[in-house]
Image: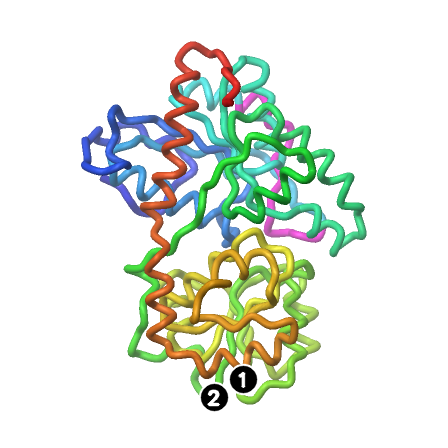
Amino acid sequence: MDDGPLTATATHGIDRLTSPGALGPRRPLRVLTVTDAWHPQVNGVVRTIEATYRELRQAGHDCDVITPLEFATVPCPGYGEIRLSLLPYRNVARRIDQSAPDVIHVATEGPLGQAARRYCVRHNVPFTTAYHTRFPQYLKAMFGTPERWVYRFLRWFHAPAWRVLTPTAEVERELAAWGIQHVARWTRGVDLDVFRPRGDPSPLVEGLARPRFLYVGRVSVEKNIEAFLKLDLPGSKIVAGVGPALELLGRRFPDVRFVGVLDREALAQLYSSVEAFVFPSLTDTFGLVMLEALACGTPVAAFPVQGPIDVVGDSDAAALDTELRRAALRALRIDRSRCRAWAERFSWRAATEQFLAQQRLVGAGLSDRAIVRPA
């Protein structure tokens, strides 16, 4: 059974096994996910879909994914690595018909997500959506767009969904406050086999003074990376990732080591080779990278905001402070064994069980093409 990286093509013919536990199928489901976020992007949306599909496939379910790799695309303004699909409705409709899914999950609100939404509404097909990205806050930070404009679009987009899947209670409250209903929990996890403490230091830290502080993620304005890079800290700073602000920040902070995008094994080795992981974002819904760092035994420093509060706010493996420098220095004093222990509370299997439970409810309605609103 294939539990490796997903491709942008259908995966028909997967063995339909019966496994014990909540993921084991009463009957196997064919799950179709439609996403505007896909490789070569490396972000929480892509990692979440990949990890969920690995778990589903291992439990005997059949998985298909529609991505921008199947369409003519143009680069998103200001985000060249993000590809926007051009006039995708007909091809999305054809792919949905070919896939013949038991359930449809729309992961993103971009052109492909809108096309899938249109198909489901037109054919009265139940579906779920997800809220991965805080676009109202991102667009306000980048372009000054009023948040209420973006929330108006989000209400329209998510309104027909059977459930809007969200990672934390705080996100659920935020969406409810803006009139987005039918939310349900779909938390996140970490691959504890890949992300674990490593004894061999990463070659990427060679020659760097200790303590070493690391940021991993998209290199863009909305991630607030500059708040980290400006800190007066001892030792060295490292940034892993790419994005539209990479060239500018590279020029402004020549003493920072920028290492680009890494595969999971190299990234785990890098996490293990630093003294603290700094997460400066003020707008993330969750922050998978915090769990990855903790799983490698590396303490986290962050602002006490949505995302860090939800993921590590009750832990003794992170330092949260309105002064990021103070948090980074406090993180150096955290016992690394506490970090791994906290990360072990989060598994992709448990997260996928939440996802699958919602899909089974949708699948019950999909068989007769009739939407029955949940209570």
The residue drawn where x is 67% and y is 46% is 135
Rendered location of residue 335, percent (x, y) = 38, 79
Q: Which residue is mark 2?
A: 210
Crowd around label 2: few <14 · some 14–19 · many ≥20 (10 Å):
few
Rendered location of residue 315, percent (x, y) = 44, 66
The residue drawn where x is 67% and y is 64% is 245
The residue drawn where x is 64% and y is 30% is 157
Q: How many numbered marks, from 0 up?
A: 2
Is 131 on the left-hand or right-hand side of 294? right
Q: How is the image coloured?
A: rainbow
Closest to the observer: 274 or 313? 313
Looking at the rendered structure, the kind of residue marked 1 is Ser
Q: Secondary structure at mark 2?
A: loop
Q: Secondary structure at mark 1?
A: strand
Whole-number angstrom distance, CA of label 2 to CA of label 1: 6 Å
Crowd around label 1: few <14 · some 14–19 · many ≥20 (10 Å):
some
Q: Quadrant of residue 200?
A: bottom left
Is 269 on the left-hand or right-hand side of 161? left
Is 162 on the left-hand or right-hand side of 272? right
Rendered location of residue 237, percent (x, y) = 55, 79
Vertical comparison of 128 with 345: above or below: above
Q: Quadrant of residue 18?
A: top left
Q: Quadrant of residue 231?
A: bottom right
**Quarter of the figure that contains the N terminus:** top left
> The magenta stretch spans which residues?
78-92
Looking at the rendered structure, the kind of residue marked 2 is Arg
Rendered location of residue 266, percent (x, y) = 38, 67
Q: Check whether the beta carbons of the residues at disc 2 and disc 1 lie within 8 A of each other.
A: yes
Q: Which residue is mark 1?
A: 236
